[in-house]
Amino acid sequence: MTAQTDTQSKAETPTKKLYVKTYGCQMNVYDSERMTETLVGQGYEAVDKPDDADLVLLNTCHIREKAAEKVYSDLGRLRKLERQRGVPMQVGVAGCVAQAEGEEIVRRMPQVDLVVGPQAYHRLPEMLQALRAGKGAQVVTDFPVNDKFADLPQTRKSSGPTAFLSVQEGCDKFCAFCVVPYTRGGEYSRPATDLLTEAKRLVDSGAREITLLGQNVNAYHGAGPDGDWSLARLVREMAKIDDLARIRYTTSHPNDMTDDLIAAHGEIDRLMPFLHLPVQSGSDKVLKAMNRKHDADSYRRLIERIRAARPDIAMSGDFIVGFPGETDEDFEDTVRLIEDIRYSQAFSFKYSPRPGTPAAGAEQVPEEIKAERLLRVQDALAKSEAAFQQTCIGQTMPVLLDRPGKLDGQMMGRSPYLQNVHLMVAAERRGEIVPVKITEAHRSSLGGTLAA
Ligand code: 5AD
Ligand code: SF4
C-alpha cells in the first residue's frame, strides 16, 4: 500500500537530489541536518555524494584560513563534475564563509546560485523559489529579528543513538583571534521549553545521548516557564526525560563555569564526565592580548573545583600557538599548563589571522616558529592523552553502542569520557548501553570485551 502511494506521489512531483557537505564544528553538523530537513519538506531527497545531485550545499567554516580556502577548491571540483556529467547542478554556499564573504563568493565563483548565512537558512525555500523564477543568484546573510528556529519545520528525528541539539548560538566575548561574533552574531539562547520538546522528540526517535551545542554553551540563559534558565537548570530538566541516558554540552568558556553548573557535574549522573573547556594559552600575557578575561591560574583553580565535584571528569581543550606577541617563554607556559591539567584529549592550531578580527593586523609570529611550536604542543598533548587512555585499561565502563565497527561482528561505542570503544557484540544491540571491560588502549580508541 505504501509502495503504491510512494509511486503515485513520485509521479506527481519527481524528487530532486540534495547533497550537503559539512565543514567545521558540530554546530554546522546540526545546521546541515536542519537544512536537509527543510529541503526534504520541499521535495528533495538527501544523497551521500554530489555525482548526480540536483542541488549541492556546502555548509562552510571560516574559523581558520585553511578551512575557508577548502570551500573554493571544492567549488572548483564541483564545476568540473558538472561539466563532465553535462547536467546542470545548483550550488549553494551556506554557513560561516557565506556569512563572512557574502556577495564576494558569487563574484569569485559565478557558478554559485545561493549564498545563505547560518542565521538565514530557514529562508532556503523562498530562495530556491526565486531561483526557479529566474531571478539570478540569491544571497541572504541577514540576522533574523525573530528566532530562525521558529521558522523551521518541527519534525526533527534522531538519526541514531547520539544526537546534537543547538541551544545557544553566537558570542559576545570577542576573543581577539575569533570570527564567531561576526559570522554567528551576538549571543542568543533558544527558549528552554522548545528545547525540551525537541529533546523529547529526539529521544522518541531513538537518541540515548544528546549533546547540547553552543559557541558559548555555558552562557546559555534561555526563557523557561518560570524565568530565564541557566545551562545547569536546562541540564537538570533534560535529565528527567525517561530514556535520555546521557547529556553532554560543548563548547564552554571558563568564565561561564558557574557554581551551579559545577555542582551539576557532581549531582547528575546522566551528565557525562567529560568537559571541553578551551584555554587557548598558558601565558597570562597572551591570554590578556587574546582578550580572554581570565589568567592561567584562575583556569587551574577552576579545574580543581570541577574535579572536586566530579573526580573522574575527563578534560579537553583547544590551544592556539603563535598568537601575535607570543615569545618562547609564553609558549613554555602553555606546555607547562598542558602538563599540569592532564587532558584526555585536546585540539591545537597555529594562529591564523582572520579578516576583521582585532589580532589580524598585528605583527605575526613567523610561520616556521608556529610550525615548531605546534609540533611541541601536539607532542605534550599526545603524552597526556596516552596517559589518560592507559588509565582506562582494566576498568569496566558503560559504553553506548552507536555504530558498526570495521570488522564483522564488531560494534563501536562511546565511553562516558567520549572515547571510541570497539568490541565484538551483535549489531542488533545498537542503542544499548553495555558494560565493557577495557583491555586495549590505542591513540584514538579503546578495545574491550562485553562484561555482562
Ligand atoms: N586561528 C587559530 N585557531 C583559532 N581558533 C579560533 N580562531 C582561531 C584562529 N584565528 C581555534 C580556537 C577555538 C577553536 C574552535 O578554534 O582554539 O577554541
Ligand atoms: Fe567554523 Fe566557527 Fe562557523 Fe563553527 S561557528 S563553522 S567553528 S566558523
Image (cartoon, rainbow, N blue to C red):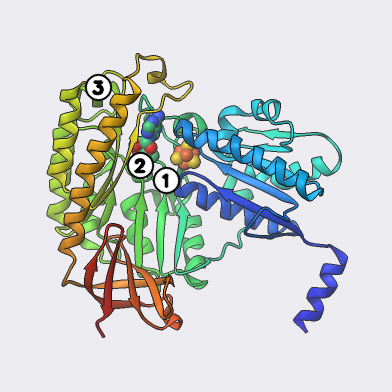
Q: Are marks 2 and 1 in contact (CB under 8 Å)?
A: yes
Q: Secondary structure at mark 2?
A: helix
Cα separation between marks 2 and 1: 9 Å
Query: Mark 3 belongs to which amino acid?
Result: Glu
Which callout, 2 or 1, points at the residue further toward the start of the chain?
1
Nearest-to-viewer mark from 1 and 3: 3
Q: Secondary structure at mark 1?
A: loop
Give whichever of 135, 324 is nearer the camera: 324
Q: Which residue is mark 2?
A: 219
Point out which mark residue 440 bears: none
Residue drawn at x 25%, y 44% is: 258
Q: Is residue 291 visible?
A: no
Residue 237: image quadrant is bottom left
Q: Taking 396 as reference, is 69 left or right?
A: right
Q: Quadrant of the C terminus?
A: bottom left
Which callout, 2 or 3, points at the residue further toward the start of the chain?
2
Q: Quadrant of the N terminus?
A: bottom right
Nearest-to-viewer mark from 2 and 3: 3
Residue drawn at x 25%, y 66% is: 269
Point out which mark residue 326 bears: 3
Cα separation between marks 2 and 3: 29 Å
Question: Can you give x and y, in whole percent of width and height, for residue 341 in the image?
Answer: 16, 45
Residue 270 position (above or below residue 168): below
Nearest-to-viewer mark from 2 and 1: 1
Cα separation between marks 1 and 3: 29 Å
Q: Residues within 10 Å of mark 1 (few under 14, many from 20)?
A: many
Q: Which residue is mark 1?
A: 214
Q: Residues within 10 Å of mark 3 (few under 14, many from 20)?
A: some
